[in-house]
Image (cartoon, rainbow, N blue to C red):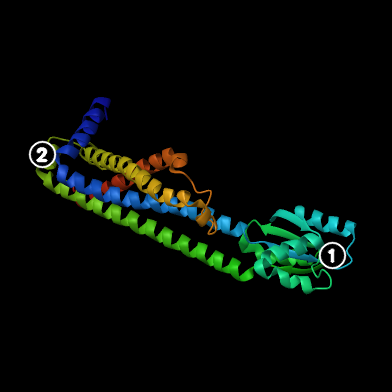
Amino acid sequence: MRTSNVNYLVKKGVSSVWKNFIMSFASFSILLVSLLQISITVLVMMNLNIVMGNIEDTNEIAIFVEEGATTEDIEHIRSVLENNSELTDVKYYSKKEAYDKFSQQMGEFSDLLDYLEENPMPETFFVRVKDIKNIRGIVEQISSINLVEKVNAPYDFAGALVNIRNTFTVIIVAILLVLTIVSVVIVSNTIRTSVFARRNEITIMKYVGATNGFIKLPFFVEGCFVGVLAGVAAWGVSWFIYDSIFSLFTDNLTLWEMFGFFDLIPFGNVSWIVLLSCCLAGAALGTAGTMISMGKYLKV
């Protein structure tokens, strides 16, 4: 196909958006809502991963060392823990430091510890697990270290956290899948209506020798163009909504930090990625809807 023909068909596809404004606006609106929901859902998922990671970081594994361990033994345990790629933030507390830490955790009941004749706290290491899903296997590794008496780990919390993350992942993937299918179906039905409205024009073009590609290209351009417009609009609305919600967490940061809502992603850091993704997704959905409609309903 000659370049002049391609330019003509592209211009015809873009102009048909305005000539068939009502149907194009219907496609635009549906794609806008779908892309908006998809972009917000993805942004929420990204931040949920950060929140889950923040919550994971607040849960430590306590490793109690047997009584009578020497300085060399302590250094050996420290070395093993620091060389374990699954662990991070290895901290050592002597008996006195462990006692002071426990006393602070007791809060107003710390006075009860004054009745103890001697310090009952063992020398202790505190570590964090990079991937909380592997916590049981890591605890078994730590327990096998010489002179490690006991390991306390938040098994129940870790299991609940993993289940919550998996549940959110399944829900969000299902939402994205449903939105994608709905968008493609509605766009294809809109293009079908557009094809039906121009059936006489298409028949005439076929009689004068126009090829299938020549007839179909304007419809593909129309679907792609509407999709890109919807992507840009979805990007702008997403920015407004996201910033409004984002400010709720940043204005009262101290309160939300207790629940892991910190280090969230500002929209400005990912704005161009969101814009590109929305435009590409809109173009893909618009084109996919056109392909389905043309293949099923346009008999040329």
Q: Is residue 296 visible?
A: no
Q: Secondary structure at mark 1?
A: loop
Residue at 67%, 65% in the rendered image: 105
Residue at image point 77% right, 67% down: 143
Q: Quadrant of residue 151?
A: bottom right
Task: Count residues near mark 1 (Cα–Cα under 10 Å), then give few for <14, some for 14-19, many for 20+.
Answer: few
Residue plotted at (50% across, 49% down): 264
Q: Which mark is residue 276?
A: none
Which of the pair 227/63 is nearer the observer? 63
Of labels 1 and 2, the one closer to you: 1
**Placement of the C terminus among the 4 image quadrants:** top left
| Count of picture labels | 2
- State the residue in front, 259 or 99: 99
Which of disc 2 and disc 1 is earlier in sequence? 1
Q: In the visual, does 147 lie left or right of 159?
A: right
Neighbours of disc 2 within 10 Å: few (<14), some (14-19), many (20+) = few
Q: CB of mark 1 within 8 Å of CB of mark 2?
A: no
Q: Residue 80, percent across and down?
A: 79, 56
Q: CA distance from mark 1 to mark 2?
A: 87 Å
Q: Identify residue for label 1.
A: 146
The quarter of the picture where residue 93 lies is bottom right
Residue at 50%, 51% (x, y): give it: 253
> Which x, y percent locates residue 237?
32, 45
**Residue 30 drawn at (x, y percent):** 26, 51
- Residue kind at label 2, given as amino acid type: Ile
Q: Is residue 186 visible?
A: yes
Q: Position of residue 154 (x, y in %)?
A: 64, 68
- Which residue lies under the disc numbered 2? 204
Q: Is residue 111 left or right of residue 31?
A: right
Quarter of the image for the N terminus: give it: top left
